[in-house]
């Protein structure tokens, strides 16, 4: 009923130039996003990393959990970089009204940025969803690292802003109904994008524009979800701020250094 | 955790297999499901019972969705009929959303303390959304589809057809996770023996969910439905109907 993979070869070809340890991170991300943590088999991971060496996972990462954890860190640094730039621009900007919408836009924008930068193999939101993390920013997984923090700050500021606007108890009650499902929404979007790109129905430019639209629409939908009667739409076109951040952020630096494996294993041990 | 066989000793094995499979998918995802675990959970001695009743694992999983979906349509039908008789021209988007989500909450209620339906549906949806859509071709699917059509008509009137479709599409992925989360919370509460009023909790949750979805869909045009009393009465009436699941005849 489920084939191990139809497009493993294209995937391998796309990332051929990366070191094998890094290819394995991409490969587990894909496997988990598609089949879940329990459904991701070592065979599938190896197939997508383009190796036949059965001991590769063990050699580079020790076990599957460390591999998954490192794969999470690998992408997560970019979220923090993005959030840092976004927060700085948001504080500079005088007409970011209403503020709650803009904070939520930043969180959505980070997902969108990651999604755009990983086309056509965008699996990160799916990966996070299948790992069961609603909100990686505040799960504490990356707390050990100096670059971690801006994403958390963004999320926490958004929560404070919501609580002030509608009262804390209402905010707590309404958040699970919408905002906490953000990751699922992005995972669904990623699946759709992949289907579009693999079917050659859309060009990359179209998809990027579509991601921008989705980012803004999702933000508005979730704000309406939280605020209901008190909902206020964006006053100005929010796309400008997103584009400015993307420009300032530049190309992403994926967090992979050969040393990070040991660090990651140690951090994981402490978390347990 | 109690086995399915212990929880439902009176059901035939054929049905227990469905329930066990549903639980396994919810807990271990569709690709992570294991035939041995399902069989053991259903209280059968060996895997040939799956072969006997369903042919193979894939057919069993197929049966899993139909099993609850038919019941959902049955409930949705009752609700829609009541709306058309009682509320008529005052039916809002919330009323139709209620017709879609109340059946799921009823399933949660009837299957406690082993409610796994929404978790299972979430797993299936995230893996292969097309599968859910393919239900549409069955004639018994009409009530749920009617509710969807009613929502999209009402939204189109306010926003235009294209925008309405986009927004419905936007909001859909939010629901599966919300329901699964609620279901899990109730299940855990049951395990610890501290669930006092599951039905009451579900009605409040349902109302909240329906309003929040309506707000997401309509945004600045959103108006609260103020139909709490309607929702509560209907939900209580439906609770009184003994659950009737639909085992596939073929």
Image (cartoon, rainbow, N blue to C red):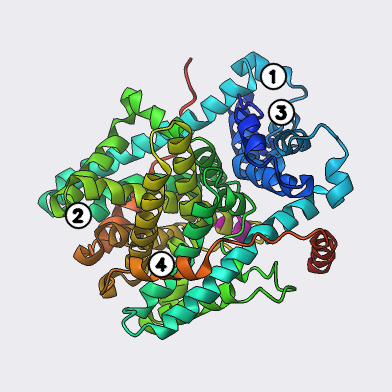
Nearer the observer: mark 2 or 4; the answer is 4
| Number of numbered callouts drawn | 4
Where B132 sits versus B14, above or below?
below
Marks 2/1 same chain: yes
Alpha carbon separation for disc pair 2 and 3 = 45 Å
**Residue wearing tag 4:** A242
Nearer the observer: mark 2 or 1; the answer is 2
Which residue does the image show at 49% across and 25% down from the upper left? B247
Which residue does the image show at 65% across and 32% down from the upper left? A8
**Residue wearing tag 2:** B92
The disc, 2 or 1, on the residue closer to the chain's N-terminal end is 1
Secondary structure under badge 3? helix
**Residue wearing tag 3:** B35
Q: Chain of mark 2?
A: B
Alpha carbon separation for disc pair 3 and 1 = 11 Å
- x then y, percent, for residue B233: 30, 55
Marks 2/4 same chain: no
- Give the magenta part as a residue range: B186-190
């Amino acid at each position: 009923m489920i084939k191990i993979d139809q497009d493993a070869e294209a995937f391998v070809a796309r990332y051929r130039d990366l070191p094998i340890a890094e290819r394995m991170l991409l490969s587990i991300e894909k496997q988990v996003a598609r089949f879940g943590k329990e459904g991701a088999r070592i065979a599938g991971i190896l197939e997508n990393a383009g190796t036949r060496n059965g001991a590769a996972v063990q050699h580079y990462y020790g076990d599957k959990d460390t591999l998954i954890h490192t794969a999470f860190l690998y992408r997560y640094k970019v979220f923090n970089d993005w959030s840092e730039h976004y927060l700085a621009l948001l504080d500079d900007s005088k007409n970011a009204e209403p503020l709650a919408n803009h904070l939520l836009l930043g969180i959505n924008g980070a997902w969108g940025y990651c999604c755009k930068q990983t086309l056509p193999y965008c699996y990160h939101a799916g990966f996070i969803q299948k790992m069961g993390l609603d909100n990686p920013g505040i799960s504490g997984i990356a707390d050990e690292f100096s670059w971690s923090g801006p994403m958390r700050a963004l999320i926490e500021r958004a929560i404070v802003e919501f609580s002030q606007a509608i009262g804390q108890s209402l905010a707590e009650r309404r958040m699970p109904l919408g905002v906490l499902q953000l990751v699922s929404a992005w995972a669904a979007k990623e699946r759709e994008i992949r289907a579009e790109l693999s079917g050659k129905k859309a060009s990359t430019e179209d998809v990027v524009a579509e991601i921008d639209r989705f980012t803004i629409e999702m933000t508005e939908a979730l704000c309406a979800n939280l605020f209901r009667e008190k909902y206020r739409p964006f006053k100005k076109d929010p796309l400008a701020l997103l584009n400015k951040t993307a420009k300032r952020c530049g190309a992403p630096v994926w967090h992979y250094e050969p040393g990070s494996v040991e660090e990651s294993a140690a951090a994981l041990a402490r978390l347990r | 955790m109690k086995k399915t066989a212990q929880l439902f000793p009176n059901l035939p094995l054929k049905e227990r297999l469905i329930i066990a499979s549903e639980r396994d998918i919810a807990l271990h995802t569709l690709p992570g499901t294991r035939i041995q675990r399902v069989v053991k959970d259903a209280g059968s001695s060996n895997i040939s019972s799956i072969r006997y009743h369903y042919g193979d694992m894939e057919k069993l999983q197929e049966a899993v969705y139909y099993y609850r979906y038919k019941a959902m349509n049955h409930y949705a039908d009752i609700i829609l009929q009541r709306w058309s008789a009682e509320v008529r021209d005052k039916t809002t988007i919330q009323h139709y959303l209620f017709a879609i989500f109340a059946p799921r909450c009823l399933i949660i209620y009837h299957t406690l303390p082993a409610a796994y339906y929404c978790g299972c549906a979430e797993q299936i949806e995230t893996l292969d959304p097309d599968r859910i859509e393919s239900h549409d071709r069955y004639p018994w699917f009409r009530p749920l589809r009617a509710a969807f059509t009613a929502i999209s008509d009402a939204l189109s009137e306010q926003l235009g057809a294209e925008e309405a479709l986009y927004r419905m599409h936007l909001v859909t992925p939010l629901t599966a996770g919300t329901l699964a989360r609620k279901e899990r919370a109730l299940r855990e509460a049951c395990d610890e023996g501290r669930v006092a009023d599951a039905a009451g909790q579900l009605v409040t949750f349902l109302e909240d969910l329906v309003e929040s979805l309506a707000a997401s869909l309509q945004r600045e045009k959103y108006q609260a439905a103020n139909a709490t009393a309607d929702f509560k009465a209907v939900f209580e009436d439906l609770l009184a109907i003994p659950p009737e699941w639909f085992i596939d005849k073929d």
